[in-house]
């Protein structure tokens, strides 16, 4: 990597592997993962005004209003070290958010380098999400069948023994989230393709294979 910041977006439906891949990129390239889903869940847990607005919408699988999401995103961007660049995980999700992101990055003297679409079959996503759980201590992600800790019940990363599942990871909400994705977010691939910023990866491949493809793209970007 060079000294230049590399900022990228991970696009893809619920369960595509955005969070899984973002965490691997953080480790490998020192990027900052910025997940609006995580920021909103934190706001819900802390009972902030943003969290109170977001809670019911997230439970229904809809989209939290752009102004609320943008505020939590800006607060996070202005509060810390951006590492070697930022991975926007689950943001933007609407055209309005995409345009706002350009403005926010320009204000900070930065730009978007690449949007990467993780392409998957919807039918497989309900299983991926229903089987998902994370370490309650460090947030490392696991799956009942495709990615279990090396020692059952013990997190590979921090050794924690408590795990949790998300409130919106039930079949009904997952279907609503998939519908929302196709109606509101999928058109963004065309938006970024027109600007010559889009790369696509077959994210039905194993996690390590997808990670390898992402690393290739990132190394090309930062060469
Ligand atoms: P968010 O938290 O962003 O959830 P999401 O987009 O639905 O995505 P997920 O976190 O479910 O999936 P992922 O792609 O990260 O997959 P993961 O890596 O975990 O958003 C939640 C809610 O917040 C939204 O519904 C909305 O209400 C609100 N929100 C968030 N951002 C917003 C915004 N910008 N605007 C408005 N509202 C917003 O992988 C899933 C599982 O699959 C894991 O168990 C993993 O181990 C496994 N897995 C991953 N990759 C593979 C692979 N290649 N092969 C096999 N298994 C795999």
Image (tube, rainbow, N blue to C red):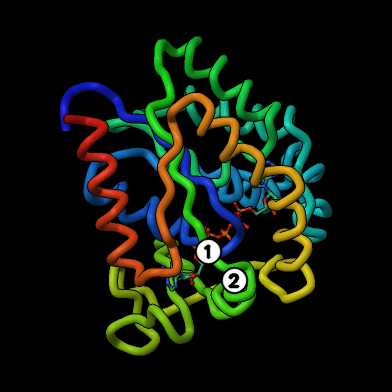
Q: Position of residue 184 (x, y in %)?
A: 73, 43
Q: Position of residue 138 (x, y in %)?
A: 40, 62
Q: Position of residue 96 (x, y in %)?
A: 70, 26
Above-or-below relation of 108 to 131 = above
Horizontal relation, residue 40 to residue 172: left or right: left
Q: Residue at x 45, y 37 (%)?
A: 198
Which residue is most to the bottom? 152
- Mark 1, mark 2: which one is toward the viewer? 1
**Residue at mark 1 to residue at mark 2: CA–CA distance:** 8 Å
Q: Residue at x 43, y 48 (%)?
A: 200
If you read the primary sequence from the N terminus, does the residue marked by circle 1 or circle 2 appear first? 1
- Quadrant placement of the C terminus: top left
SS of the residue under disc 2: helix
Q: Which residue is mark 1?
A: 120
**Pointer 2 residue Cβ closer than 8 Å to ligand 1:** no
Q: Which residue is mark 2?
A: 125
Which quadrant of the picture is home to ligand 1?
A: bottom right
Label pair 1/2, CB-CB below 8 angstroms? yes
**Pointer 1 residue Cβ closer than 8 Å to ligand 1:** yes
Q: Nearer the viewer, residue 4 or 149?
A: 4
- Quadrant placement of the N terminus: top left
In the rendered image, which quarter is residue 203 located in?
bottom left
Q: Position of residue 192 (x, y in %)?
A: 53, 31
Which disc, if any, is residue 195?
none
SS of the residue under disc 1: loop
């Amino acid at each position: 990597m060079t000294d230049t910041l590399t900022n990228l977006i991970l696009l893809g439906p619920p369960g595509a592997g955005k969070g899984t891949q973002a965490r691997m990129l953080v480790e490998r390239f020192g990027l900052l993962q910025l997940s609006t889903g995580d920021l909103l869940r934190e706001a819900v847990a802390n009972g902030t005004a943003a969290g109170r607005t977001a809670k019911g919408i997230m439970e229904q699988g809809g989209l939290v209003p752009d102004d609320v999401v943008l505020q939590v995103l800006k607060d996070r961007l202005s509060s810390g070290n951006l590492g070697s660049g930022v991975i926007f995980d689950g943001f933007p999700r609407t055209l309005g958010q995409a345009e706002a992101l350009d403005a926010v990055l320009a204000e900070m003297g930065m730009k978007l380098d690449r949007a990467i679409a993780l392409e998957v079959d919807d039918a497989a996503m309900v299983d991926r999400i229903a089987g998902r759980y994370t370490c309650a201590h460090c947030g490392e992600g696991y799956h009942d069948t495709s990615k279990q800790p090396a020692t059952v019940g013990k997190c590979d990363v921090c050794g924690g023994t408590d795990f949790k599942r998300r409130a919106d990871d039930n079949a009904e909400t997952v279907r609503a989230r998939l519908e929302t994705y196709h109606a509101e977010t999928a058109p963004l691939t065309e938006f970024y393709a027109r600007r010559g910023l889009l790369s696509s990866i077959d994210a039905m491949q194993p996690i390590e294979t997808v990670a390898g493809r992402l690393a290739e793209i990132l190394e090309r970007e930062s060469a």
